[in-house]
Image (cartoon, rainbow, N blue to C red):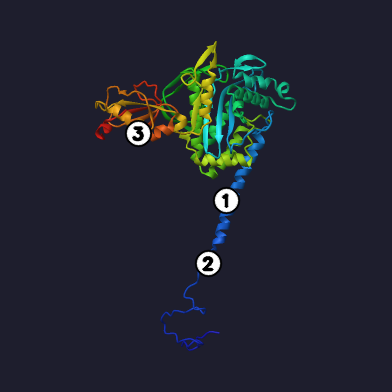
């Protein structure tokens, strides 16, 4: 019923006050001046976050499990002796397989051994030249890259029925590398194998969207092999550059511009760039990357371009990879190579016979967590400031701080306004501390115009003279 009578005069509402035409503030019956905002309890918020994390982890594991179903194979040698979480040896075998022309045989193009320690959060690489001479029981003295091919061709004879050619090639290559490095004397072996063909290598990098490589010097190869057994000219200018899978494959394989040792250095550089590229992505992007990689390297009815005995869907493997991916600085990956200058060598035709004591010492360094102690870096100081005795006094200061010094020398004529530390060898921990101590710029690479046997070269600039 309306409170307004027929004569147009307002009357007092029941229980209220007369209407005067002025705005009145009406109080809520419960005494509240404004409606309360609804607040989400903290428990609900936490529950929602937990459910979201579980969903993301579940999606990630599902992607990894799907990938594992396609690429993980059993090891005919039996179960591994160690877990990636506690420290394992993983052999990467780069193979040249023309699947449409299997009658032409297979070759292992690359042998790189990875020491992977999930709990410690570190990774070391050790490259073995393919011309390394080893003793194969069935063949006698042979190049080490013949091991994969022999296992591939004699799968049943070596490991029995039901073993594929790829499994046998991987197993025989792993055992050969273990014997060559005398890992059994250390109570270990090659625990897992990853086989990558050229298509798989390129697909991995394309799935990442490419990688960035800082090419240290110009590379010109007039006879790079093509898939149709021809040759072509390839060229890389020095400096940082973005590479897709096809270009990165050429960079990792080319060797006519320098040697097979230069090629192993480039291969390790590519591994470092891949790790860096993965670390630039958040965890959700990494999960999406797994699906792209799975689709790129596997085709229905065909052998995957990447095959491994590493159980990538196991919890310990996932924990190890997650810890390393979260904490590892790619620049601190240990990079070791069996090569002249590091290991004494003799030749038998084109075969390389390495000094066993030197190889053992290098393996010890490879098995040691990265750090200054394992780097054993030598430093040489060059005087670019023109102040008499500056390089000698700086060398004495560095020696007092625990660095190993070679004899100081004068830098080539030129302008050196700032002190620069050049990291030539695989000595990132020592080089970083040295640059911090001197307040100098750190450059990875060789100094222009200077030849030195040192792992790290310091060129003192005018700022060093002013600081005395």
Circle 3: element type: strand
Tell me the residue that label 2 is attached to: 38
Query: To which quarter of the image does residue 203 belong?
Result: top right
Name the residue furthest front. 400
Q: Rounded to the nearest whole Å, what is the CA distance between mark 1 and mark 3?
A: 42 Å
Q: Nearer the viewer, mark 1 or mark 3?
A: 3
Tell me the residue that label 3 is attached to: 441
User: With respect to residue 54, does 377 lie above or below?
Assistant: above
Q: Rounded to the nearest whole Å, what is the CA distance between mark 3 and mark 2?
A: 56 Å
Q: Which mark is residue 187?
A: none
Q: Nearer the viewer, mark 2 or mark 1?
A: 1
Q: Nearer the viewer, mark 3 or mark 2?
A: 3
Query: To which quarter of the image does residue 201 belong?
Result: top right
Q: Residues within 10 Å of mark 3 (few under 14, many from 20)?
A: some
- Nearer-N-terminus badge (2/1): 2
* Side of 388 where 170 appears, left or right: right
- Nearer-N-terminus badge (1/3): 1
Assign the C terminus to one quadrant of the image. Answer: top left
Which residue shows up at 58% across the image and 48% down it?
56
Determine if residue 50 is in view: yes
Assign the N terminus to one quadrant of the image. Answer: bottom right
Q: Residues within 10 Å of mark 1 (few under 14, many from 20)?
A: few
User: With respect to residue 122, does 183 lie above or below?
Assistant: above
Indicate the position of residue 396 as horizontal and vertical percent values.
32, 29
Of residues 222 and 111, the one drawn nearer to the viewer in this rendering? 111
Tell me the residue that label 1 is attached to: 53
């Amino acid at each position: 019923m309306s409170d307004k009578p027929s004569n147009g005069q307002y009357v007092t509402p029941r229980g209220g006050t007369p209407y005067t035409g002025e705005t009145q503030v009406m109080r809520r019956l419960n005494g509240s001046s404004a409606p309360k905002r609804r607040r989400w309890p903290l428990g609900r918020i936490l529950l929602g976050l937990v459910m979201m994390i579980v969903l993301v982890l579940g999606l990630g594991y599902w992607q990894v499990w799907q990938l594992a179903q396609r690429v993980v194979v059993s090891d005919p040698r039996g179960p591994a002796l160690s877990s990636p979480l506690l420290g394992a040896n993983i052999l990467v075998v780069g193979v040249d397989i023309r699947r449409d022309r299997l009658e032409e045989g297979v070759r292992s193009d690359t042998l790189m051994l990875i020491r992977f320690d999930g709990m410690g959060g570190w990774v070391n690489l050790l490259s073995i030249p393919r011309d390394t001479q080893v003793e194969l029981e069935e063949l006698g003295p042979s190049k080490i890259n013949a091991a994969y091919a022999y296992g591939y061709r004699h799968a049943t004879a070596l490991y029995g029925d039901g073993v594929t050619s790829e499994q046998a090639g991987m197993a025989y290559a792993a055992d050969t590398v273990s014997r060559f490095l005398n890992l059994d004397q250390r109570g270990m072996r090659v625990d897992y194998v990853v086989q990558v063909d050229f298509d798989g290598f390129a697909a991995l990098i394309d799935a990442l969207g490419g990688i960035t490589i800082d090419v240290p010097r110009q590379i010109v190869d007039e006879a790079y092999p093509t898939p149709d057994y021809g040759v072509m000219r390839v060229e890389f200018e020095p400096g940082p550059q973005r590479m897709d899978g096809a270009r990165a494959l050429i960079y990792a394989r080319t060797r006519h511009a320098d040697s097979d040792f230069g090629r192993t250095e480039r291969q390790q550089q590519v591994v470092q760039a891949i790790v860096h590229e993965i670390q630039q992505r958040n965890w959700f992007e990494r999960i999406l990357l797994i699906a792209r990689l799975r689709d790129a390297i596997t085709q229905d009815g065909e052998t995957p371009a990447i095959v491994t005995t590493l159980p990538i869907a196991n919890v310990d493997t996932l924990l190890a990879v997650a810890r390393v991916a979260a904490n590892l600085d790619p620049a601190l990956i240990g990079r070791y190579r069996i090569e002249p200058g590091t290991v004494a060598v003799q030749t038998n035709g084109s075969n390389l016979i390495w000094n066993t004591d030197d190889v053992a010492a290098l393996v010890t360094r490879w098995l040691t967590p990265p750090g200054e102690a394992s780097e054993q870096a030598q430093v040489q100081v060059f005087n670019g400031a023109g102040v008499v005795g500056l390089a000698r006094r700086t060398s004495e200061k560095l020696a007092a701080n625990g660095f190993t010094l070679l004899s100081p020398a004068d830098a080539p004529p030129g302008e050196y306004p700032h002190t620069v530390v050049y990291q030539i060898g695989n000595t990132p921990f020592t080089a970083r501390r040295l640059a911090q101590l001197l307040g100098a710029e750190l450059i990875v690479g060789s100094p222009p115009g200077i030849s030195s046997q040192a792992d790290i070269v310091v060129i003192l600039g005018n700022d060093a003279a002013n600081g005395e």
